[in-house]
Amino acid sequence: MSADSTTKFGFVCVQNAGRSQMSTAFAERERERRDLEDSVEILTGGTHPADHVHEEVVEVMGEEGFDLSERTPREVSTDELESCDIVATMGCSTLELDAETVDVRDWALDDPDGQEMEQVREIRDDIEQRVVDLFDEFNPDD
C-alpha cells in the first residue's frame, strides 16, 4: 500500500453475523494499529443478512476486547464488492465477482453459529491470524 493510494478490503459471508463481523473487527484494529486509517477502507456485508450478530460471536469477541453487540448485519451489493481490491469470503459464498478487478479469497471457515464456545474461539483465532497476514501482505514494511 503506498501512501497516495487506498486499498479496500471486503469481508463477506451469507448472514454477515459471524465470520465477516469478526474479520471486520480485527481488520479495523489492524488498520488502527498500523496507522493506516487514511489508506485502508473496510467493507463488510452479507448476501442474506441476519437480524443480529450471533450471540456466541459477540461473547468470544468480547473476550478479546471487541464489543459487537451493537453491530447490525447489512446487505452488500455486487457493485460494492467490485469496488474492493480484495474480497475475503468465509467459505459460504456464491458470489460471482469480476476476477479481473477483484482478488477474491475464500477462507473456507466453519460457521460459528450454534457451535460450542471452544470451536467459536478457534474460528476467531484463525480469523485474527488471516487478517494480520492480509495486512502483512499489503503493508510488509510494518
Image: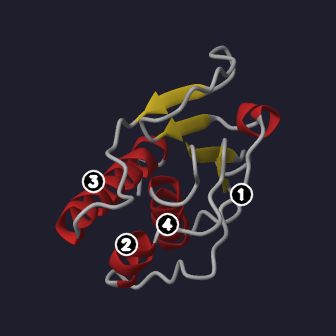
Q: Position of residue 71 (x, y in %)?
A: 63, 74
**Whole-percent x, y for residue 100 in the image:** 66, 14
Q: In screen coordinates, is 110 left or right of 139?
A: left
Q: Which residue is mark 1?
A: 74
Residue at image point 65% right, 20% down: 96
Mark 2 is on which residue type?
A: Glu
The residue furthest left is 118
Residue drawn at x 57%, y 26% as measured from the top left: 94
Observer-nearest of 117 and 1: 117
Q: Are marks 4 and 1 in contact (CB under 8 Å)?
A: no
Task: Give the CA separation, mark 4 to mark 1.
Answer: 27 Å
Farthest residue toward the front? 114
Answer with the quarter of the image where residue 107 lies. top left
Q: Which quadrant, please, contains the C terminus?
A: bottom left
Q: CA distance from mark 3 to mark 2?
A: 16 Å
Q: Secondary structure at mark 2?
A: helix
Mark 1 and mark 3 in contact? Answer it, CB < 8 Å.
Answer: no
Q: CA distance from mark 4 to mark 2?
A: 28 Å
